[in-house]
Image: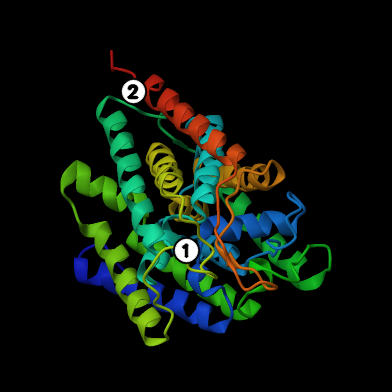
């Protein structure tokens, strides 16, 4: 199965992923968050008590499915390769930064596309920041940025994360050790089996198509190559049709229930941070999970960083709040980014610049 040899196949792969996201939304996932890597990692971290925000605690089977789907398909097609050793601590820090930027915006690049397809104009503002962040990362690449070369290692090394997610699934299904929200986004989810199957399908297609939201824009800027963009376009079109057909398409800002805010500068800067850090790390949050599933311990370190980042956001009040309807007064309460989140976002951007322009490829002697 090769999806990368034609734009039509890539677009079809993206469309299938869009169908998966739409089905999960119909089956219970928050409609505007049908499939969000940042939100689902945050929820899973909450299930383990890494943060105490009770409304976002649930071990999301989609995350488990993504890793296992990428692992299974890469083994089946002989693409599995255990690698490690390329600046793991910097990648860990970049994972934290990606999560902070995502929770200032309230979503990863995948959710940004889903929100765009539902008419959320805040997500279109964020897209500008995301592209600018990637462009800054591309500038660093042109200036010689590199985190070094990963090396092939023992194949067991690359199996660690897939084994961990299987353990999470067992804990979630067979014990009551993990926390689960009784209200809020964490309480809204599709049935476990549907979520797991959806994650497996999404993960397999993402692995075979090299789906990456940051990588698609990076390739356009660097090489005028629109191949990866075809995958994203396929997903967007399917979600747009789904949202229009089901009455979920609402064009505007400050829409209650979308779990978004209209602080435009911070939507822009939040996704600028994600785009910049993802380009330096070699892929968006989704791509990091897929790479980790196919054997990259470096990507796994970025994933661990994202888990820690989500805990930092909710333990230290960095995450934004979404526009909501007050149940008692029926008044719209605008979402906002807290001061802590704004300060953290600026610090993250500064750290990205330090990483980008101090890590250079070594010249061959």
Secondary structure of the residue carrying tag 2 is loop
- The span from disc 1 to disc 2 (Cα, nearest Å) is 45 Å
Of labels 1 and 2, the one closer to you: 1
- Which residue is located at x 40 percent, y 32 percent? 149
Task: Name the foreground residue: 284 vs 167.
Answer: 284
38 sits left or right of 280 in the view: right
Vertical side of 202 occupied by 78: above or below = above
Can residue 78 be seen? Answer: no
Q: Badge 2 is on which residue?
A: 361
314 lies above or below 110: above
Image coords of residue 46 (percent x, y):
71, 56
- Residue 305 numbered tag: none
Q: Position of residue 274 (x, y in %)?
A: 44, 44
Residue that lies at the very extreme toward the bottom in this rendered image: 245
Crowding at dot 1, Cα within 10 Å, few <14 / some 14-19 / many 20+, comes out as: many
- How many numbered circles does the render carry? 2
The dot on residue 254 is 1
Visible residue check, residue 89: yes
**Is 225 placed left or right of 365 in the picture?**
left
Which quadrant is the N terminus positioned in?
bottom left
Above or below, 320 relative to 133: below
């Amino acid at each position: 199965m090769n999806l990368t040899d034609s734009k039509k196949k890539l677009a079809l792969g993206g469309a299938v992923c869009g169908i998966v996201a739409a089905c999960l939304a119909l089956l219970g996932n928050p409609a505007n968050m049908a499939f969000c890597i940042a939100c689902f990692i945050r929820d899973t971290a909450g299930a383990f008590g890494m943060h105490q925000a009770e409304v976002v605690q649930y071990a999301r089977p989609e995350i488990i499915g993504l890793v296992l789907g990428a692992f299974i398909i890469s083994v089946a097609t002989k693409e599995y390769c255990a690698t490690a050793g390329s600046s793991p601590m910097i990648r860990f820090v970049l994972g934290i930064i990606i999560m902070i930027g995502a929770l200032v915006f309230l979503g990863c690049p995948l959710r940004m596309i889903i929100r765009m397809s539902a008419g959320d104009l805040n997500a279109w503002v964020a897209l500008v920041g995301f592209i600018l962040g990637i462009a800054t990362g591309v500038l660093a690449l042109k200036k010689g940025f590199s985190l070094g070369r990963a090396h092939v290692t023992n194949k067991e090394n690359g199996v660690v994360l897939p084994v961990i997610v299987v353990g999470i699934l067992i804990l979630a299904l067979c014990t009551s050790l993990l926390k689960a929200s009784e209200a809020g986004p964490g309480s809204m989810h599709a049935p476990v089996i549907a979520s797991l199957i959806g994650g497996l399908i999404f993960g397999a297609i993402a692995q075979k198509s090299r789906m990456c939201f940051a990588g698609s824009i990076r390739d356009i800027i660097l090489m005028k190559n629109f191949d990866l963009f075809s995958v994203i376009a396929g997903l967007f079109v399917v979600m747009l049709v789904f949202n229009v057909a089901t009455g979920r398409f609402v064009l505007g800002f400050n829409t209650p229930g979308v779990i978004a805010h209209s602080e435009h500068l911070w939507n822009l800067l939040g996704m600028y941070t994600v785009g910049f850090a993802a380009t330096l790390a070699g892929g968006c949050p989704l791509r990091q999970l897929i790479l980790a599933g196919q054997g990259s311990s470096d990507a796994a370190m970025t994933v661990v960083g994202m888990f820690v980042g989500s805990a930092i956001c909710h333990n230290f009040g960095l995450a934004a709040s979404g526009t909501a309807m007050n149940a008692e007064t029926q008044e719209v309460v605008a979402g906002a980014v807290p001061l802590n989140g704004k300060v953290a976002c600026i610090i993250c951007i500064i750290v990205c610049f330090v990483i980008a322009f101090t890590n250079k490829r070594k010249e061959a002697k």
